[in-house]
Image: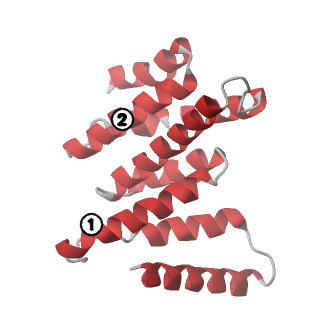
Amino acid sequence: MRNQCIEILTHIIKQNFRKNKNHCNLHEFKDEILIATLKAYSPDIAPQHQCITNQVAEDLLEQLVISSQVEFFSQTLEPLLRTEQPPRLQALLRMICNKLKFLARLQAANPHKQVLTPAETQALIENLVCLSEVLAHLMTNQNADVRKSVVFCMVEIHSAVAEDDIFNEVFMDKLNQS
């Protein structure tokens, strides 16, 4: 499995460098890795191999989102949340949770220092707000696991936003409409 991941990444890197001739767009590169990794959540993979495949994919997706700027939420994940189906939807929602948990762990490890600058905090909130509409829509998904993942995601967002007024106005009001 590890070799398959290395092979996929090597292919994507080679393809990206050929396409961009010495200029690698990191945003496009991460998008390609994301799309390729999401393919691991496929019914084509034998059930006995899915656990291993999915764990490798989860680890890769977690590292991808942790190393990304907060704009990754609105530029990449939000459009995918509108088009992907379970179980890929849950993987995307876990990515959001993982990034927010990572930021919370950083802050907890450095309680006397702000991990994010005020501008970075504002950018985080703005990018999370961009997710509110799609998350409200996903709460109506027929799949209970998707709805459960949305709830977990909303809990992490509430912790990250840390301002009840903003959370209630932007997220809860949209949920009440759906």
User: Can residue 53 be seen from the camera position used here?
Assistant: yes
Percent coordinates x, y for residue 56 in the rendering: 41, 67
For marks 2 and 1 on the same chain, the one whose residue lies earlier in the sequence: 1
Percent coordinates x, y for residue 92 in the rendering: 43, 52
Q: Secondary structure at mark 2?
A: helix
Which amino acid type is shown beneath numbered disc 1? Answer: Cys
| Left-right relation of 5 to 19 | left
Quadrant where the N terminus lies? bottom left
At 42% from the left and 19% from the top, the residue drawn is 173
Mark 2 surroundings within 10 Å by alpha-carbon count, few (fewer than 14), some (14 through 19), many (20 or more): some
The residue closer to the viewer here, 134 or 158, is: 158
Mark 1 surroundings within 10 Å by alpha-carbon count, few (fewer than 14), some (14 through 19), many (20 or more): few
Q: How many marks?
A: 2
At 57% from the left and 64% from the top, the residue drawn is 31
Tell me which corner region of the image, top left, top right, bottom left or bottom right, holds residue 105: top right
Q: From the viewer's perspective, is residue 168 above or below residue 146?
A: above
The residue that label 2 is drawn on is: 152
Separation (CA) of disc 2 from disc 1: 21 Å
The residue closer to the viewer here, 136 or 69, is: 69
The residue that label 1 is drawn on is: 51
Colouring mode (rainbow / by chain / secondary structure / one colour): secondary structure
Quadrant where the C terminus lies? top left
| Left-right relation of 97 to 110 | left
Which amino acid type is shown beneath numbered disc 2? Answer: Phe
